[in-house]
Amino acid sequence: MSRIGKLPISIPDKVEVKIEGNLVKVKGPLGELVQDTRGQVKVSVSDGHVICEPRGEEQQDNAFHGLYRSLIHNMVVGVSKGYKRELDIVGVGYRAELKGNSILFQLGYSHPIDFPLPKGVTAEVDPKSFHIVLKGYDKHLLGQVAANMRALRRPEPYKGKGVKYTEEVIRRKAGKAGGK
């Protein structure tokens, strides 16, 4: 059995967890999330805690035990506190601008890129340092949006130009003249 899966998930105030068949619904002040456990994990709520147990003794059930516990924990934290992901734009002439519910990027291509933000994700762009802060209650969606933004212009190893996560360290390479 999974060590992570054995840990109970405490439910904070103002968060409501409902189990309807294989669906786990978590509702809080920031939003509502739903996760399908596909019947491989038995989820129950008791004494202000969510408890996950494998449905059977099959290897597949044990494999998904810790996964679904982590997903449910991320849902509870997301609807109560929310998540934040930060990106930096590095490069001369590279910039971003918040326009309504989308971000307009200029990343050295011949055209600007309009990146629409999905529902549940908000952004703040610092106009001087081009530091982007993404906030949302769905950890998976937030991470995917940040990865899609980074994929617009990945940081290159010679000058470090591009869109990168704030905590990311770019391994720099020496250029042609650097090897002599």
Image (spheres, rainbow, N blue to C red):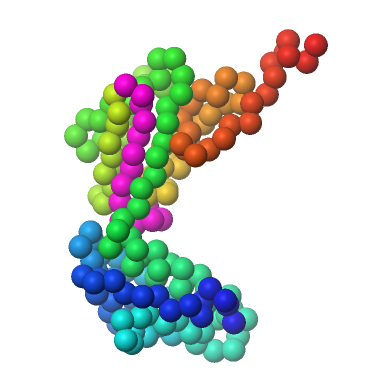
Residue reaching furthest right? 180
> Looking at the picture, does residue 8 appear above or below residue 123?
below
Identify which residue, 163 or 48, lies in the foreground. Answer: 48
Q: Answer with the quarter of the image where residue 110 lies.
A: top left
What's the residue at 59%, 82% (across, down)? 1
Tell me the quarter of the picture where residue 137 sits.
bottom left
Residue 139 part of the magenta segment? yes
Q: In this view, does 29 lie to the left or right of 149?
A: left
Q: In which quarter of the image is the C terminus?
A: top right
In x, y percent, where is residue 94? 40, 20
* Residue 16, visible in the rendered structure: yes
Q: In this view, does 163 lie to the left or right of 135?
A: right
Q: Which residue is drawn at 51% across and 77% down?
A: 5
Vertical arrangement, residue 107 with respect to residue 39, above or below: above
Residue 4 point in image, percent of width and height: 53, 73
Can residue 107 be found in the magenta stretch? no
Report the magenta residues as a range.
128-141
Q: What x and y, as percent, mark residue 106?
A: 37, 21
